[in-house]
Image (spheres, rainbow, N blue to C red):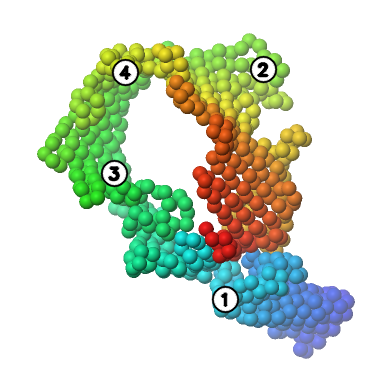
Amino acid sequence: MILLLAEVTFRGNFLEYFPDSGLVLLYDSAYVKTSEGTELWADTIKYWRFAHVVEASGNFVLKTPESKITGRYLKYNLLRQTGLACRSRTYVEKGWIVGDTVYKVSENSIYTTDGYFTTCELPRPHYRFVSNKMRVLKGDLAVVKPLVLYIRDLPILYAPFWFMPAGKERSSGFLPPSIGNSTKDGLYIRNLSFYLALDNFQDVTVFADIIEKRGVRFGLDYRYNVYKLLKGGFVGTYAYDLAEGGNIRRWSLKGDHAQSLLGFDLNAHADFVSDARYFQDYAEVPDRWIQNELVSYLTLRRRLKLGLLSINLYNRYEPVRNVVRRTLPEIVFNLLPLNVYGISLSNSFNLRREETDSSGNRRYSGIASSSHVLNTTYNLLHLNFSPSLFLNTIAKDSGVGNFLIGKKYGFRVPLSTTLYGVSLFGFWRFKKFRHILKPTVSYYYERTADSVIGLPGENRGLNIILDNTHEVKIRKDTVDQVKTLLQWSASTNYIFSDTLKDSSLWSRFTPITFSVRSEPMRRISIVATGSYDQRRGALNGAQIIFNFGRFNINELLTGKRSTDSTDAETLDTVMKDTVMTEEDIIEANRPKPSPWTFGFSYSYSVSPSFQSKQSILRFGISGSPTPNWFVDYSFTYDLVNRRYLDQSLSVGRDLHCWKLEARWSWFGGFSTYNVRIYVKAIPEIAVKRGVLDIFLPR
């Protein structure tokens, strides 16, 4: 039976209507739908027409444009979209809330007692975050008190309260710390942090590291981004280090900033530490351990009517050598090219002050330099003629009474053309072959007037270059395609000047340098480089690289290109950056096996006179042995010395709503490992290596 009242539709096998009170009773497969799209299914439904309130008992399903709620009992205001549900399950951003009693107090706020949150769609979820009291602000965050993580029915983790993100937008809350043990630091808790989203343009993370053998280190990570005005951020740390037997204060500061200021484009980067061993003692990333230079700078650039003005400040610090090099300041002005009748004049001016501080020994110098280039291009029939003149000057004050002036000038006259050769025949699918030859001959002259700018004397000669490209036209179906088969080039210099004539290595012709590249098939390339000394009749050195990209084994066996492979990184991006529906969560929880692929490369190189050689093989293979497992293994092997240079092994296991990733790598006699178990739909919820460090100290 169907009843229509105003903009509400009723349906049920049995229906009673009381006009005076506006009460509608529906029994057996009851259904209510409003004009706004809200739908309710239940065993029994009571609807108070004037109050716009429904009461459902038995199994019910309530669908609104924003959410879906299921349960055993419901009382709901259709107009305000507020109410309560008992023994219910409702979907919020990236998961479900299941509770004994769920109150929807506003359109975007849900309060739950004796409930839990999970991203597992199974009736008996693999995991859940259980709480006596939970409030969820849709699209923002969830506040719970207390929080207990259950794996099946086993409690794993407890916190008196917690903040969890409940949307794709940035949300304030605690971030998971890293707990572990190492032989160097002892027991530790790293990244004990709280993230605070200040507004749409800035956020800050306050964190602390508690290390048994070093004490406490505090940190602040501040980020900002105001559209088209400024953006950047900095990370600062301050530590009370107990390792050396006393309260030693140590610190670090790293940051970036960019903005427009008074017509200038300002860019700044800072990287400072209190001492040379800071990274070795505190950095968790091995790359920072061996960092041998810290660069900080401030640059101001502005485009003027006459050219580009740059003002730069640089600070370069070498922690190991305790050497600081500063440029305070550097002013660079590049004039716009002046073009007259096809002749172009370019001018650049540089003024800078340099300072070097080596263990307290300071040296200063002031340098002024300029560069001037005059060039033009003419086409004479099939020849390209591009002569150029240059003049470089420099004035240097070393700060000890020495004032030096130097200059370097010269010219270059290149002459080039392009020749084409086309075959008269082809075979099979190869319709035509084409050879493109581009020879270039340049006469050059350079003279250096003072040692302050280089080796005094003159240098003149010819530079000869031959560039070759071999192409083929292939008929595929009814379409002709042009493919490059081979590219190679060779160059040498013929020297007129006799500056180094007395040297035993002197020769009119310099060694011939060459390079060859070919891609005979998709994913396969061959590259060769080297030089040939025609005076000795031997190679000065050469290298050849065979690169075989990743091949799909199934494609090789069947001859068909795979079209259903899933890009895991794309899936991760979708899960992080888009609003996920229930169907998206269920799809993300399904295992997605990867096809088996492999690839390898081989490089062979020799030094001059074949005194030493290298023969390196790199190989990698990855795929899913079962729908739930993923394996990726790669290595680099030295065929000459018969030893491995590096190896890495990654293993992944699909755990339905969770995913396990483990990686082991070895390099130079040292090995590291990393383990992470995380929720697929919310990768921020993860158990990382730090927990295992308690049992497997580093």
Find disc 4 in the rendering and name its residue: 444
Q: Which residue is mark 1?
A: 159
* Mark 1 Cα-neighbour bin, 10 Å: few <14, some 14–19, many ≥20: few
Q: Nearer the viewer, mark 1 or mark 2?
A: 1
Q: Residue 665 in the image: state x and y as whole percent.
A: 57, 48
Q: Residues within 10 Å of mark 2 (few under 14, many from 20)?
A: some
Circle 3/circle 4 CB separation < 8 Å: no
Q: Residue at x 67, y 72 (%)?
A: 150
Quarter-of-image position of residue 204: bottom left
Q: Are marks 1 and 3 in contact (CB under 8 Å)?
A: no
For the residues carrying marks 1 and 3, which lies nearer the camera in this image? 1
User: Is residue 681 visible to us here?
Assistant: no
Left or right: where 544 falls relative to 266: right
Farthest-out residue, bottom: 20
Give the residue drawn at x 33%, y 51%.
Answer: 319
Q: Position of residue 467 (x, y in %)?
A: 48, 19
Where is residue 3, by image quadrant? Answer: bottom right
Q: Which mark is residue 431?
A: 2
Dot 4 or dot 2: first in sequence order is 2
SS assignment at label 2:
strand
Q: From this viewpoint, is residue 538 visible?
A: yes
Name the kind of residue labelled 2 in the image.
Lys
First in sequence: mark 1 vs mark 3: 1
Query: In this figure, which residue is indicated by the disc labeled 3?
Result: 310
Name the residue at the top extreme: 424
Work out whether 605 lies above or below 93.
above
624 vs 449: above or below? below
Relative to 476, is 524 on the left or the right? left
| Residue drawn 77% across the image and 35% down it | 558
Mark 1 or mark 4: which comes first in sequence? 1
* Sequence-earlier tag: 1 or 2: 1
- Distance, label 1 to label 3, CA atoms, is 54 Å
